[in-house]
Amino acid sequence: MRSDSRLSRMLHVLLHMAKHDQPFTSEQIATMLNTNPVVVRRTMAGLRKAGYVRSEKGHGGGWTLSCDLKEVTLLDIHKAVGGPRIFFIGHENENPSCDVAKVVNAALGDVLKEAEALVMQRLEAIPLAELLAEFEQLYKAEMAELDRKMAEQ
C-alpha cells in the first residue's frame, strides 16, 4: 500500500516559504516535490481555505504564507490537506456474525482508537515554528562546517 505523503510534502513547502520570503508558483512547488502543478494547486487549496496560505495570480504572483507559524500545528496542516486516517488497519468484516470476529474487531478497534488519539495529540503539540527553528539550526551548522572546510583549504 502506498503511503500518503501530503502532510510531509506540504510541511516541506511551508518551511521553504517561511525561509524564502517570496511567492512560489505552483510550477516551482511541483518541481520541488517532483509532481504536477495541478496536484500542487489542489493540495494548496486546502491550505488556502484554512487561511494558512494565499495565492496571487499574474506576473510576480504565487503562493505565500498568510499565518503565524507559532500558531499553526502539524495537526492543523494534516486536517487542511484532507489528511487520511492515520492507520489503515481495518476489520475484515465490520458487522460479523462470528463471535471470534466480534472479539477481534473490538480489540483492534480499541487499540487503533487509542493509537490514533496519541498521534493526533502529538501532532497538535508541534507548531510549525518549531520545525523552522530546527531547520535553521541544522542549516547554520552545515554552513559553519562548510566555512570550516573552506578555511582549511
Image (tube, rainbow, N blue to C red):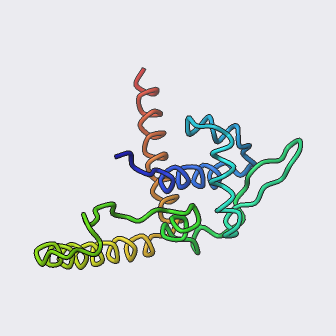
Q: Look at 57% across and 71% down and name the residue there.
A: 72
In this view, the residue in front, 4 or 67, is: 4
Q: Look at 23% across and 79% down and name the residue there.
A: 110
* Figure quadrant of the C terminus: top left
Residue 68, relative to residue 62: is it above or below?
below
Rendering coords of residue 82 (x, y %)? 55, 63
Residue 107, relative to residue 60: is it above or below?
below
Q: Look at 78% across and 55% down and name the residue there.
A: 55
Rendering coords of residue 129 (x, y %)? 54, 65
State how many labels appear.
0
Q: Which residue lies furthest to the top in this view?
A: 153
In this view, the residue in front, 8 or 80, is: 80
Locate residue 66: give its quadrant.
bottom right
In this view, the residue in front, 69 or 26, is: 26
Residue 34, relative to residue 4: is it above or below?
above
Locate residue 96: give its quadrant.
bottom left
Locate residue 101: give its quadrant.
bottom left
Rendering coords of residue 58 (x, y %)? 89, 44
Q: Residue furthest left?
A: 100
Q: Which residue lies furthest to the front in this view?
A: 97
**Left or right: where does residue 33 sit relative to residue 37?**
left
Rendering coords of residue 50 (x, y %)? 66, 70
Q: Look at 33% across and 60% down and name the residue there.
A: 88
Q: Residue furthest right?
A: 58
In this view, the residue in front, 100 or 65, is: 100
